[in-house]
Amino acid sequence: MARQPRKQTAVLIPVFRDDRGNLRLVLVLRGVKGMHGGQLGLPGGAAEAADSSPLETALREAEEEIGLRREEVEILADLDPIDTRTTGLRVHPYLAHVPSRSSWHVASDEIQGVVTPLVGALTERSRRHKKLISFPTWPEPRLTEYVEIDGDQLLWGLTLRLLDSVLPRLQAGEWKV
């Protein structure tokens, strides 16, 4: 039986330096609806017919979801696509430098909020834990690695896998932010 083609999606990995020079990441807390409802993730989503490229998808989605205008975005790296393990998606990630801001214009029908954790906190091994997590496409809960953010939000799954491959390189100075 032929394998179904993966649905093409794209995300931005927006980073900035705060007023103290600390490197921060922009994450969105998805609304309760949809496949990833209630989860922390990166701004982005599915390609639309009018999108000329995965980068166009990522920029459009970031603007729609958190009000990040494309002229504010400096693309630092076009990273290798990564496939989800359970949902049939191929995600095209783009590392981006964005301006620091104290508020975001969220699409309230899709996004509950924005969190901007310190990159250093996300890479600390002591913040890694495992627990049983369930997800609509999993038949039963799985022991899953996660990082706790702001006391009650969990960063896990594809977003964590993607960040694990990028954030250490970012901290090492591979890209100038």
Image (tube, grey):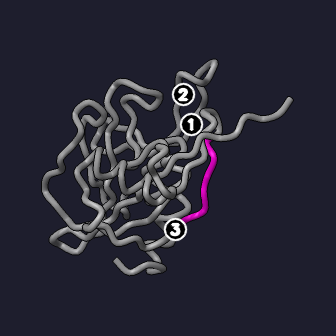
Place of residue 126 in the rendered image (x, y in percent of width and height, measured from the top left): 45, 53
Q: Quadrant of residue 121?
A: bottom left
**How busy is the neighbourhood of tag 2: few (under 14 within 10 Å), some, or many (20 plus)?**
few
In the picture as drawn, the residue positioned furthest to the top comes out as 139
Marks 3 and 1, how far apart in space? 28 Å
What kind of residue is marked 1? Thr
Q: Which residue is mark 2?
A: 132
Q: Quadrant of residue 100?
A: bottom left
Question: What residue lies at 51% left-to-right and 56% top-to-bottom?
Answer: 54
Q: Is residue 9 above or below residue 35?
A: below
Whether tag 2 and tag 1 are in contact, CB under 8 A, the answer is yes
Question: What residue lies at 21% left-to-right and 42% top-to-bottom?
Answer: 106
- Which residue is more in the foreground, 170 or 99? 99
Chain part drawn in magenta? 78-84
Q: Is residue 86 above or below residue 45?
A: above
Image quadrant for the C terminus?
A: bottom left
Q: Is residue 88 rendered to the left or right of residue 174?
A: right
Earlier-in-chain disc, 2 versus 1:
2
User: Which numbered disc covers residue 78?
Assistant: 3
Q: Which residue is mark 1?
A: 144
**How busy is the neighbourhood of tag 3: few (under 14 within 10 Å), some, or many (20 plus)?**
some
Q: Is residue 92 rendered to the left or right of residue 116?
A: right
- Which residue is more in the foreground, 23 or 150? 23
Question: What residue lies at 27% left-to-right and 67% top-to-bottom?
Answer: 71
